[in-house]
Every structure is written in C-alpha cells, then in structure tokens.
Amino acid sequence: MCRPLAGAKTKQTLAQFNWQVTGQTGRKYAVGIYHGLSTGHLVVHCNSRVVLIDFNVNQPKTYSFLLDRDLCELKIDREDNQYTYDLDLPDALQEVSNREISWDNYYAFGTLVAFFLTIYLLVIWLRPYIPS
C-alpha cells in the first residue's frame, strides 16, 4: 500500500465507476466510466466496448445511450469540486419497451408455427409422390 509523504496532498486524477445493468431481455451489461478530473475527458464503456467519448466535461451534463431497447441516462453533476455520477433507466421508456417485447414474442411464435405447419403440409402433400 502506498502512502503519501508527510505534508504531501493527495490528488485524485481519475474517477472510475461501474454499474451492473440487466436489460429488458435479461441480458446483463457492465457499464463503466472513466472521467479524468484534471482534464475532464470522459469515456463510457459497456461490456468492454466504448459507447461514448467526450472531452472537457467540467460542467453538469446528461448523456443518453441505448442498451438493448432501454434508454440509459448518465448524469454528471458537480458540487463543490466533487463529481457525482448517476445512471438510470426512465420508467416510461421501460413500459413502452415491455409492450414492444411482448409483440415481438407473438411474432416469433407465429413465425415458428407457420414454419412447422408449412413443413407438415409439404410432407403430407408430397407423400404420394415419394417412391417407396
């Protein structure tokens, strides 16, 4: 463990945070940020892929990005030379996303039934033409 020298001031130069987010489909995401406190440069990554880069972020700011069908908002606030980071999913968008997923499930089920019904009917109709 490193300790600062007597009388030396410690200075935090990089803020790093991570969140674990579960999407509407059940997929898990590791969302993280790196924020250079002296330069203000910001990098947002999700599952080890860079989602967002911004430079000179020294004032409160809000960023939006998608995870699956979820709109995530990253809010950066500055209070007394301290930064606070908040990642949230708006409730209204979650409800719309739930409705869309339920319709997608119906379409997928209907497509699957149509596929197997087509195969079944082809086998029955073509059975007399298949040599024994």
Image (tube, rainbow, N blue to C red):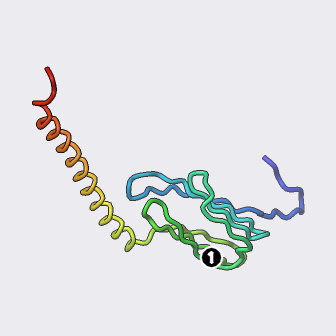
Front residue of 10/71: it is 71
The residue positioned 19% from the left and 44% from the top of the image is 118
| Residue 12 x %, y % | 76, 63
Residue at the extreme top: 132
The residue positioned 51% from the left and 55% from the top of the image is 20
Give the left or right position of residue 1, taking residue 108 as reference: right
Give the left or right position of residue 110, taking residue 38 as reference: left
Circle 1 Cα neighbour tier, 10 Å, few/some/many (<14 / 14–19 / ≥20): some
Quarter occupied by the C terminus: top left
The answer to which image quadrant residue 91 occupies is bottom left
| Residue 9 x %, y % | 85, 64
Q: Which residue does the numbered mark 1 point to in the structure image?
A: 77
Front residue of 66/104: it is 104
| Residue 85 x %, y % | 60, 69
Q: Which kind of residue does numbered mark 1 sit on?
A: Asp
Give the left or right position of residue 45, taking residue 89 as reference: right
The answer to which image quadrant residue 60 occupies is bottom right
The residue positioned 68% from the left and 70% from the top of the image is 54
